[in-house]
Image (tube, rainbow, N blue to C red):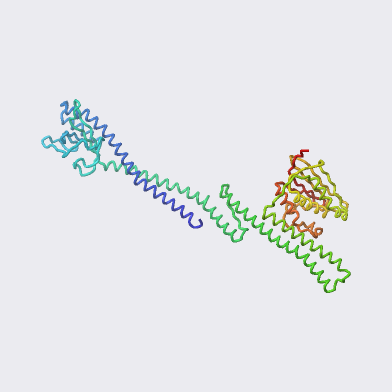
Amino acid sequence: MKKTLYTKFILAYIIFGLFGFAVVATFVSSMTLEHLKREKADSLYKEATLIANTYASDLYNSQASIDVVQKQLNALSTYLGASIWIINPSGRIILDTSTPLDIDNPVLVENFDPTITSGSYYTVGDFFNMFEEEKLSVFAPITTNYEVKGYVVIHVSMNAIRKSCDNLLNISYIMLVILFLLSLIILIFFTEIVYIPLRKITVATEQFAAGNMAYDLQIDSGDEIGYLAASLSYMASEIARSEENQRKMVANVSHDFRSPLTSIKGYLEAMIDGTIPPEMSEKYMKIVLNETDRLTKLTNSLLTLNNLNTSGMLLDRTNFDINQVIKNTAASFEGTCKSKMVAIELILTGEIMIVNADVLKIQQVLYNILDNAIKFSPKDSVIKIETTEKHSKIFVSIKDHGIGIPKDSLKLIWDRFYKTDLSRGKDKKGTGLGLSITKEIIHAHGENINVISTEGVGSEFIFSLPKVENDD
């Protein structure tokens, strides 16, 4: 396309012009000549019939002299621009407007045959070798008492008809040239609206393929080409963002793995070389164990996230009581809440709330959100978990009174490994993957999750699940 599309279009345009001229020069030319020939023959046949029924009939009925008829036909011949003959069935020319009247030396048409018209009323040729040029000859019989006495033959030069044809063809050629020039507008439109944008898109795709995702593709058009350009630009920005996220992911994974590994290595070396006395080993072994738990948690989160992306998350959906799952999840944090002096308040609608979802994955969602809520809540604060029913949906809300999320970070908290500046000091063991996994799980269920947060006031996470009517 880069080198040949425009050339092909120009070539097609030239072929169109040449083909148009060829059609006019051949088909249109022959059709126009045939039309003019028939039109002239029709006109002359009417005149010949009129002469046969008047002047020629009077001549054969001895009602008019040959001199009178000669003068009348001479005048008509001049008007028609043709020569008029009166011929006997034997071929003898009685009267010829193109030559003076000579009764003593009649002219005989050799092999005269009125059937030469083959069922028509005209013929084209030299009229039995009587002319050196091609003539259009029209026959009209002269009849008296139902008997053919002779024929009126009108001859007109084919050169005159061809000249008229050429004049009409010249008009056709001029119109064709005008149309050909006007069709340049299509070529200009094609260049401006199609070819130039396609060239820009081609250059842009080459730049994108070379890794230059920052290349600026500008096409101001509201049609399909403009939409294609916008889609390519959006694709490039998404790829660039994906590559940036990948780089951040590698950097974050490297950092999150390096920190606990450095601690583990340091403590183990210190215990081996005696820097840490044997009586203190148990304490530091517990620290090493905590760091290994952190590595295990990070690894499991990465594997979970990878499975979500590759297999599209397979759900084992069942009907279960979301209220009971919330109670069980809250109970699992009892020890943590006591140590941090944080209370969990449950405000659950109804005794039983049946939903259809993957119970284990919803437990993971609740665990991730509640773990963050406890982690960032101050002492003596209350975390509220509430369920409400609306439009065949169950909405689960988990609200804390912690440090909150900055406004410019609200859209970023779902990104992998993202941690706000406020959370970094308190989230020592976090991987930054919990909310990413949470969002993937909820979206896999075809539902939504949102967050409302004010910095220094607290955060509220709300997600929905499809309700199942309880037959009981």
**With 148 as the anchor, is 257 left or right in this view?**
right
Pick out the residue farthest to the bottom.
Answer: 273
Image quadrant assignment for residue 124? top left
Place of residue 261 in the rendered image (x, y in percent of width and height, measured from the top left): 77, 66
State how many labels appear: 0
Place of residue 168 in the rendered image (x, y in percent of width and height, measured from the top left): 34, 42
Foreground residue among 408 and 286: 286
Q: Relative to residue 413, is residue 73 depicted above or below?
A: above
Place of residue 18 in the rendered image (x, y in percent of width and height, measured from the top left): 39, 50
**With 4 as the anchor, is 103 left or right in this view?**
left
**Residue at left offset 27%, top offset 36%:** 41
Foreground residue among 233 and 433: 433
Pick out the residue farthest to the left.
Answer: 104
Foreground residue among 450 and 394: 394
**Residue at left offset 69%, top offset 61%:** 247
Place of residue 323 in the rendered image (x, y in percent of width and height, measured from the top left): 80, 45
